[in-house]
Structures are given as C-alpha cells and as structure tokens.
Amino acid sequence: MSGPDHASLARRAREVLDRNRRGAWTCPSGELYPHLWLWDSCFIAIGVARYDAPRAADELRALFRGQWANGMVPHMIFAEGVHDVGSRRLWQSRNNPAAPRDVETSCITQPPLPAVAAAHVARALPDDERERFLADVYPRLVAYHRWLYRERDLRGRGLVTLIHPWECGLDTTPPWMDALRRMPAPWWMRLALGLHLARVVRFLRRDTRFVPAAERPSDDDGLRMLVLARRAKRDDFELRRMPADRSLLIEDLAFNALLVVANRCLRRIAEDLDETIDPDLARCFDATPAALDELWDEPTGQYYSRQATTGDRLTTSTVATFVPLWAGVAPSRVTPLVALLRQPRHYRPQFPVPSVAVDAPEFDANRYWKGPTWINMNWVIVRGLRECGEMAMADELRDRTLDLVEQTGCFEYFSPISGRGFGAEEFSWTAALVIDLLGDEHPDDDVGDAPRAR
Ligand code: GLC
C-alpha cells in the first residue's frame, strides 16, 4: 500500500457518503442516481459499517422498506420529492398488490447482497444492538431468499433466472446486450433502430443530462432495455407468466455466484440467532454451488451466464467470470482464472480489473460496463482471491484499487488504460468500498461470507 495519503482518501470518501446521505439512507450519486438502489445500499452499508455501524444498520432497514409482501426486494426505491416521471411511470409498482403502499419501487430485483451486508453490519454493532438488528432483518432476508428460489428457480435447479439486464447490476454487459440484440423486436423498434431514431430515448433518460453520452449505454441498448421492461410489465414481471419467445431469461453468473455467498451469510446469521433455515430452503441453498459449476466452460477455462430456456452459454468473457472465486470453487477452476487475471492483454492492464477483457472486440475503455474498471467488482475479486488463498494477489489488487481512487477520485468507473474517471463524480459505492478496503488489513475478520472457517 502506498501509505500516508490513504488517511486523506478515507476522509474524502466519508465526505462523499455524507453528501449523498438522504436521512436514513444514501443515494449512489446526488445528480445521476438520486434514488435508493439495492446493491448500492448493500455496498454502502458495508463501508459505512467501518465507522458508523448504526447508520449502516439504518441503510439496510431503509432498503427493506421497499420489500414486497411476496419477499421480493426491488432494485430501486424512488426518493420522495425527486422528479423522475419517466422511470416511475415505467414501473407503477402500486398497481401490484404485493408492492408496499408507502414507497414507490421498481418491480425487479438486483444482486442479492442484503444478507452479506447484514453480516458486515452485525459484526460492527455492539452486542445488544446486534441482536436487535439481526432479529429485525432475519425474517426479511429469509423471505427474500425464499422468493428468489420460489419465483425465479421454477425448475428447482439451484440457479436463479433473471428477467432483465438491470437485475444483473452489470447493466449493459456484452453477453446480455448480445442476447438482447438477437431477440425478435417489434416492427416499430426495428424501424427506429434502422433509421437511427433510438436517440429519442434520450428524452426519457436522466443520465445523459449529466454525463457525456459516449460514456453511457448506447441509445440502441437503452431503447432495447426499455422495451424489454415494458414487455415484462405485461406479465407483471412474473417469470412464470413470461413467454420464452418474448422474454430474455438468463441464469446470470455473477448473480448466482453472489447468491452462494449470500446463502452462506444467511446460514451464519441463523446460527447466531439460534434459528433454523427450513429444510426446503436449505435444500435450495445446497443445490446452488453445484449448479454454479455447470456454468464452467472447460475449453476456455472460464465461467459464463447461460440462457435459461435453451441452456446455451453466453460465451463473451467479462469480469463476471471471477465472481465464483468468492463463492468457493475447486482448485481446477482457480488456476486458469488466476492466470487470466494476471495477463496484461486480458484482465491486467494498467488499472485493473476491466469489466471486459482489453483484447476483446467488445472492449471500450470509456463506456459503462463495456470495459471500464468498477470498484465493486475489484472488491468482490479481492475477497475471491482471499478465499482461494491468493493473498499476495488480493493485497496487490486492493492496493492498486486504493491508489486508483486516491489519484482520480471517487468516480463511478475508470478507464483501465488511462485511469481516467467516468460517470458520476462522487459515487457512493466507490467511496464505501474504498473505506472497507482500507480497513481490510486484517483479513482474518470472519463475517461468515467465507466458504470455510479461516
Ligand atoms: C447503474 C449500475 C447499477 C447501479 C446503478 C445505481 O445503473 O449499472 O449496477 O446499481 O447504476 O448506481
């Protein structure tokens, strides 16, 4: 670690989190993302827990205000008083009887990190508060995990199916966008794309008001994602009602790998509370690690997402391939992945880890999830490397990540080639995870997210 400057980094990161604070919760970025997002709030809680555990507990409680009666935790909760008509109209959550009455939410979910965040927060709370906090969130966590398996693993195979790229968190990641492009489109959309009219979606977009369009999802991808969400709305966003030929149904790699970690954390929380996960849910938990291994592709030595209906692998390599390291995988999987992480022309450019390999045709250093380095992915990979015993590599990636943010600022994402920052300038998860990485010098802290006792 390059040392003394990091004290000021921690201070600056806290300032970002204070500026983005909205009472009990924290938005990802004041201008660009003024609402609450699921996995952002989890990362925020993990970082904030390092210095203000009660605030971190509130962050998760605020996240659960959006939980639906069926257990779903939505990917967004709309902030009161923020004018964002386009986005609210798309979801209209209150039309669904299961949605909460007092807040408006989206109708899809995001990577299932609440149990992981709850474990981090619980570790930081004093004993009496810890018990109260866990007793509060435990039934909500169980309801969420139950919903994931009941509503999104219809064949009981152990893998959760996602219905929209916004659910995977790596929104415009090439495998999802390729699959989306291959879907049959309505005539008017084909016409709009053919005549390059997709630019009209800019009127509905908030992001391009604040950030150059070249750093954001393309208009074509934006239009396709919007149309997909409107199609899913016709079926009330319910997987069991969605026709295979008009839907994009994907067993997403990163999501399911994170689910393995989250299940582990939830089991640990249950133990701490002297609760028992019911046998049906426990069987689901047990099925996921083996099912995750089906996403391994031996010829290329990588993991990929796959189409839920056809079983076809989406074989564009992305940073998601490394997420299973955290889930705990066999050594025969670790070796090729670690080698890939070491190669400059793949995943080890000047400022790792790029969201797409730098030598891939899809790579674009400046555009959103098509190449830039994202701090949350680095954080996940640091934890993954630790899990598989690659301590020196984990420490090196942690230090490089801290140096990058130290030099550039708490941006949303970074060019892996030049280190330039893009997107939101004061991005909460960058700030929060930097704080967590700074406190991570004692990696034997066990919050229950490790596959085995350390
Ligand atoms: C972007 C990211 C998504 C995140 C959201 C709010 O859409 O792709 O993962 O949750 O911004 O920060």
Image (cartoon, grey):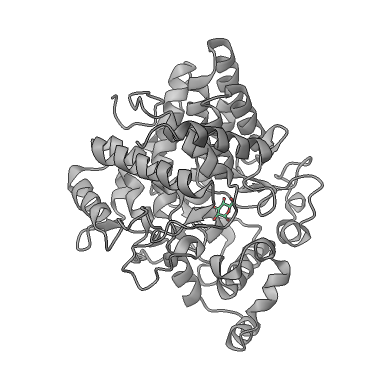
The extreme top residue here reads 128
* Total labels drawn: 0
The image shows residue 55, relative to residue 68, as above or below, that is: above
Where's residue 335, x and y in %? 19, 48
Quadrant of the frame with the C terminus:
top left
The image shows residue 272, relative to residue 366, as above or below, that is: above
Query: Which of the 4 image quarters holds residue 362?
Result: bottom left
Where's residue 286, x and y in %? 35, 37
Query: Which of the 4 image quarters holds residue 21?
Result: top right
Quadrant of the frame with the N terminus:
top left
Q: Nearer the viewer, residue 454 or 400?
A: 400
Residue 156 visible in this rendered orientation of the protein: no
Residue 260 visible in this rendered orientation of the protein: yes
The extreme front residue here reads 4
Q: Nearer the viewer, residue 400 or 65?
A: 400
The image shows residue 192, relative to residue 403, as above or below, that is: below
The extreme right residue here reads 81
Q: Nearer the viewer, residue 330 or 203?
A: 203
What residue is shown at x 57% (from left), y 57% (from top)? 423
What residue is shown at x 53% (from left), y 37% (from top)? 432
Where's residue 385, x and y in %? 29, 40
Query: In the visual, does 394 lie left or right of 205?
Result: left
Where's residue 269, x and y in %? 47, 24
